[in-house]
Amino acid sequence: MTRHRSLRSRLAGIPARQLLLLLDFDGTLAPIVLRPDRATLPAPVRAVLHRLVRLIPVVVVSGRALGDLRRRVNVPGIRYIASHGLAFKEPRSPVRWLGRRVPRREVLRWVRALRSSAAGIHGALVEDKGWSVALHDRSVHHADRAILRRRVLRALKPWLTNGQAALVRGKRVLEIRPADSWNKGTAVAAVLARPWARNRIPVYLGDDRTDRDAFRTVRGRGLAVRVGGRRGIWDEDAWLASPAAVVSVLTWLTTRREAT
Ligand SMILES: [Mg+2]
């Protein structure tokens, strides 16, 4: 596919029976908010997802834990990749684990290490995600972010140096999880190998650096669409300015597919 054609004309060129949409949640479907626990799916986005999922398979992809993500999306028929690619859930099927999990007692040690790093730093938020732990610093004063980061690296050093755990950086979030285990790209590859997806053309929309792994997976087979940030620096196939531009494209696509 050539790069200069618009996203809409390229989407129009993919037959409905071949299209597969993979949509990141925060910053792609839902606007980024100061506190991640306050993020909600805007009503027009939920309405268009309800229509779209009747026409083509839709996978919502997120670093959020599965239960959290499903509650926030709440559209029947949607498939989910959660926890940055660890969990995959299809309607009426049990969860499929796509990566190696560590025992809960180990994750709880990470929780304690991050909580003590964050102690006394206003706005720092430690989130126990079950199989990984996130530290959000969007509400932390700029001057305190470097201090927090130094403390985190010191507290997590035992796990980072023995190779058991890895730190993954997203938008104003640091996440600790098992090393060499999974990411959005490995999860998308696993989903694309499923019988229903095998012959489909994946179109992936994402805004975060963690989405770049998925961009690499779909490259050459489908389309990688970056949302927000600076246009053109991620080697994306297409770029959309914001979640508002995403819902506009999804609405256009849905209306067009419903008419045929
Ligand atoms: Mg995102």
Image (cartoon, rainbow, N blue to C red):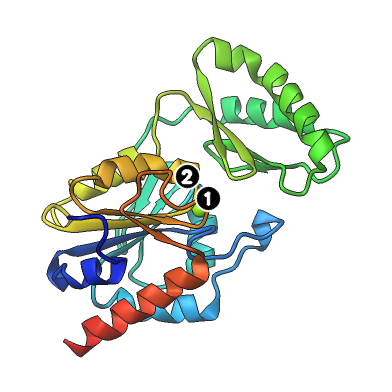
In the rendered image, the residue lying farthest to the bottom is 259
In the rendered image, the residue lying farthest to the right is 120
Q: Are marks 1 and 2 in contact (CB under 8 Å)?
A: yes
Circle 2: element type? helix
Residue at the location (62% across, 12% down)? 158
Label 2 amino acid?
Answer: Ser
Q: Is residue 85 left or right of residue 27?
A: left
User: Marks 1 and 2, how far apart in space?
Assistant: 5 Å
Asked whether mark 2 and ligand 1 are closer than 8 Å, the reply comes as no
Residue 252: give x, y in percent of width and height. Answer: 33, 80
State which quadrant residue 97 falls in: top left
| Position above or below: 9 against 37 | below
Q: Quadrant of the N terminus?
A: bottom left
Residue at the location (53% across, 65% down)? 71
| Position above or below: 143 against 113 | below
Work out whether residue 241 or residue 48 is closer to the camera in this orientation and state it: 241
| Position above or below: 259 against 129 | below
Residue at the location (48% across, 53% down)? 207
Question: Which residue is under mark 2?
Answer: 83
Work out whether residue 155 or residue 170 is closer to the camera in this orientation and state it: 170
How crowded pointer 1 is (Cα within 10 Å; few <14, some 14-19, many 20+) is rated as many
Q: Would residue 206 be seen by someone viewing this image from the given angle?
A: yes
Q: Would residue 97 be seen by someone viewing this image from the given angle?
A: no
Q: Is residue 171 left or right of residue 97?
A: right
Question: Which residue is under mark 1?
Answer: 64
Quick one: label 1 or label 2, which is nearer the N terminus? 1
Residue at the location (55% across, 75% down)? 42
State which quadrant residue 11 falls in: bottom left
In the rendered image, the residue lying farthest to the left is 199
Residue 47: give x, y in percent of width and height. Answer: 44, 81
Q: Quadrant of the C terminus?
A: bottom left
Work out whether residue 92 or residue 179 is closer to the camera in this orientation and state it: 179
